[in-house]
Image (tube, rainbow, N blue to C red):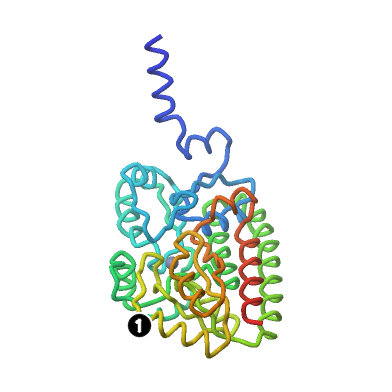
Amino acid sequence: MKKIIYIFALFLLVGCTNEQQAEETGKISVIASFYPIADFVERVGGDLVEVETLVGAGVDPHGWEMSTQDRNEIEKSSIFIYNGSGFEHWADDVIESAKETNTDFVAIESSQGLTLAEGHSHSHDHEDEAHEEAHDREGGAYDAHTWISLPNAVHQMEVIKDALSEIYPEHAEEFSSNFEKERDAFLALHERALEAFEEVKRKDFIVGHESFGYLAKDYGLTQHGIEGASSLGEPDPKRMAELVELAKETGLTTIFYDPLGSDKIAQTIASEIGGEAKELNPLEGRTQEEIDANLDYLAIMQKNINALSEALE
Ligand SMILES: [Zn+2]
């Protein structure tokens, strides 16, 4: 009996890695860094891929730390796909060591080729060292939240499509047709958003976590962050007073917060202006509610666009 339990425990320990699961099902095993990347890989790979996401559901990737187990898993894996542009501050290091130990290892930086926008620095004097370091490594204060723009997301899916097609040329046709279908859906939503934002009265919006820069740029809007480029920042009273002033001047009554973070500061500002705080999801992850409702990247973007255009009416 003891032996059986031991074997069973051993099976639980070693028997359930993504790589092995994929081997059993004949699927291509991919490790994605965090939610939107996993969504993109699944769209392009369809039934051919088995995707594992490193940053767990409901976890804020800014505060995420890699465990030894995560590190081992990446090093053993053959395909690791990440956002890049400095968002995953831990990526360079693990990619380097995986390449040293595993000759099959391929890392795909999905944001490669995108033109990065400068990040805002007004609230960078908080303790968000990880994010700061990532910015420094990129040679300047760039905004790494590339995926929040629909055209950028299409670009990132295309990078993933090209890379997977190179590794698995026998599936290139399927990856291409999956990609084209998704690209059309993403760009259709982008067109609807362009129309919606063309009609809004206000162009400024206030968000807790300054992660909508690329979306704002797409639609001629300006984001004003309360907490800076990371959801882990703390606002200073001066910044809050500025934003209260801005809301009063522009007649804004909705203050947005990241559902993976805290709504406290957005609520404080909202109550000062007699407005309300609402969710705007920068898609660094999904809430349990969104997972239960089966909302994916595109559905959450649709919700974001609706909420934002309503607030700016
Ligand atoms: Zn962020």
**Picture coordinates of residue 185, whole percent (x, y):** 70, 65
What's the residue type where badge 1 is placed? Lys
Q: Ligand 1 is in which quadrant of the figure?
A: bottom left
User: Where's the C terminus, which quadrant?
Assistant: bottom right
Q: Is residue 151 left or right of residue 133?
A: right
User: Where's the N terminus, which quadrant?
Assistant: top left
Which residue is rendered at x = 57% and y = 82% of the image?
252
Residue 204 or residue 265, whichever sits in front: 265
Residue 222's place in the image compared with 131, above or below, is below
Neighbor class of circle 1 (other Cα within 10 Å; few <14, some 14-19, many 20+) is few
**Residue tagged by mark 1?**
238
Total marks in image: 1
Residue 130's place in the image compared with 294, above or below, is below
**Picture coordinates of residue 112, whole percent (x, y):** 46, 69
Q: Is residue 250 left or right of residue 189?
A: left
In the rendered image, the residue lying farthest to the bottom is 249
Establish whether ligand 1 lies closer than 8 Å to the Cβ of label 1. no
Which residue is rendered at x = 35% and y = 55% of the image?
95
Residue 248's place in the image compared with 192, above or below, is below
Q: Is residue 267 left or right of residue 183?
A: left
Residue 74 or residue 269, whichever sits in front: 269
**Picture coordinates of residue 152, whole percent (x, y):** 55, 71
**Picture coordinates of residue 111, whole percent (x, y):** 48, 68
Q: Secondary structure at mark 1?
A: helix
Residue 95 or residue 303, whichever sits in front: 303
Which residue is rendered at x = 42% and y = 58% of the image?
61
Which residue is rendered at x = 71% and y = 75% of the image?
192
Residue 50 picture quarter? top right
Residue 169 or residue 124, whichever sits in front: 124
Residue 199's place in the image compared with 270, above or below, is below
